[in-house]
Image (cartoon, rainbow, N blue to C red):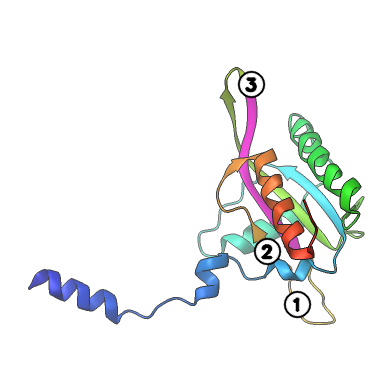
Amino acid sequence: MVLLACVVSVLGQPAEPAVQTRNNHTGNISELRDKQRALLIVFKSRVVDVDNPERAIIDDVLKADPQPKGRYRFVYNELAHKLNKYINKYKSLSSARDLADAEYVIYFNVVEFRRILNTIYPYGELFVIVKGSPRESKPPRIVWRARKMMIGTDAVDELVKALKALRGEGS
């Protein structure tokens, strides 16, 4: 009887919209179809906001210095190398020098450095944030995020696959 009551109460709860559970963010990667200028930012975010974690991430990134400091410079160079391969092959992406020049931001949040087989790898989350448009009343928003926390270069590989699929680019 207790088990039946639990099942009924779970079934009676409203389901979340499919878009939120599938994307886990407010935007959609299709917004990048016509955008080319991207700014890569790498740092460790120290902001935590359980009420609105996406807003905290966006605010932190928009205030960040695009020039990496310390050991984040190494991570930045690794990720930039991967993105440059994609840029050179497909020409559908270009790098921006600063936030004002960028149409969107590729942000890698370094969570920790892991040692695997005597090599250190940056481990964290990758986000793609489209800048807002005051004329269209669109705030900045996350349009893509890696499916899980992972090694930085693997996260960029996942993003490049998504961009290729979005733009119909071959292998």
Answer whether labels 3 and 1 touch (C-beta < 8 Å).
no
Q: In the image, which disc is placed on residue 14? A: none
Percent position of residue 164, x then y: 76, 57
- Neighbours of disc 2 within 10 Å: few (<14), some (14-19), many (20+): many
- Asked whether, in this view, residue 148 is left or right of residue 27, the answer is left
Q: Nearer the viewer, mark 2 or mark 1?
A: 2
Q: Which residue appears at 21% of the width and 73% of the height?
A: 7
- Dot 2: what SS? strand
Pair 3/1: label in front: 3
| Rendered residue at 74%/43% (across/down) | 42
Magenta range is 119-130
* Residue type at tag 1: Lys
Which residue, as the protein is rendered here, is positioned at the far top? 118
Q: Which mark is residue 138?
A: 1
Mark 1 lies on a secondary structure that is: loop
Of the pair 135 and 90, the residue shown nearer to us:
90
Residue type, label 2 = Ile
Q: Which mark is residue 119?
A: 3
Give the x, y percent position of residue 141: 70, 67
| Element under disc 3 | strand
Q: Nearer the viewer, mark 3 or mark 2?
A: 3
User: Residue 70: image x %, image y %?
Assistant: 77, 30
Mark 2 — residue?
142
Magenta segment, principal secondary structure?
strand
